[in-house]
Image (spheres, helix red, strand yellow):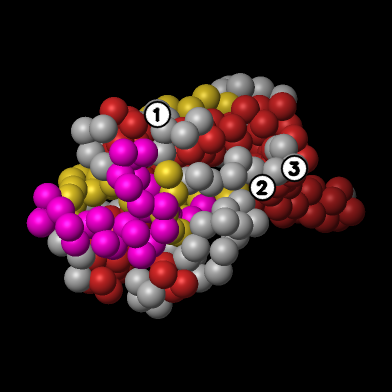
Amino acid sequence: MQRRTLVAGAAAAALPLAAPALRAQGFPSRPVQVLIGWPPGGGVDVMGRAMAEAMAAELGGPVVVENRAGAAGVIATLAAARAAPDGHTLLFMSLSELAVRQAASRTDYDLERDFAPISLSGVTPIVIAVHPRVPAATPAEFAGWVRGQGGRVNYGSPGTGTLQHFAGEALRHATGLDMQHVPYRGAAPAVTDLIAGTIEVVSSGLPPLVGHVAAGRARLIAASTARRTSVLPEVPTFREAGWGDVDIANYVGFAAPRATPPAVLARLEAAAVAAARSRASARPSAAPAPR
């Protein structure tokens, strides 16, 4: 009798430890939803959709992207923070942007309190790009052109308070160039207006510009990272251009609500890492050369 009681007690004590692992074995039990705080076509959206597709193959079930644009990503961030912590709702975000916003102003979210990190999926530079009719191919030519426009130059960004906005303002203050900021609801609308010629300059992440640069519909002037990257070996940095000691990059990845079980987080992390590796191996060996 005593032995049976001890065995039953040990089994009962082990149940809380086994529960997360058992939950992970049945995960996912329905489609995984990935919230993105920007409209389709922007840099975070492009990367998030590619990662979601690759993760679906790893998880053996659908991974569905939902764009909840607005408030520079905050709407999606709050929705993800308040979602059920079971791994079926994730946030694909620019961690650096949300951290900067939290540090700069009062927010209804706290990255450490509300989220459990899953995996970093990529790092992308912020670039200054121009319409082909702008007679500038170098930072010096760009600065000379802006000064000759008498304050009539507007530059677009994905929105007020974004990293792209900060990069544009860093450029403006370091050089004294007279440019006016035009906030959009995301990178895709800003790049669309650049290609259409509605605006002549954008501060943007790289993904929504790559195809347009390769086709000659846009030209890259400078990148905001501290050093030239392997993706943009021909594009000078802000520092090289004399545009200030600037090092701004988008660190993008997945997070889940804070109380998500550790075993589920581990499953998601393994799927995200495998997805990133499969995407990296599938990329062309050479990136489109800037023009």
Q: Can residue 21 be seen at all in this image of the molecule?
A: no
User: What is the quadrant of residue 141 in the picture?
Assistant: bottom left
Callout in the foreground (2, 3): 3
Label 1's element?
loop
Is 127 included in the stretch rendered in magenta? yes
Left/right placement of residue 71 relative to residue 236 reads left
Tell me the residue that label 2 is attached to: 269
Measure the C-alpha gap from mark 1 to mark 3: 26 Å
In the depicted structure, whether residue 169 falls above or below residue 137: below
Foreground pick, 252 / 28: 252
* Mark 1 and mark 2 residues within 8 Å of each other at the beta carbon: no
Tell me the kind of residue under disc 1: Pro
Tell me the residue that label 1 is attached to: 40
* Mark 1 and mark 3 residues within 8 Å of each other at the beta carbon: no
Which residue is pictured at 44% across the width and 73% down the height?
A: 239
In primary-sequence order, the first of circles 1 and 2 is: 1
Callout in the foreground (1, 3): 3
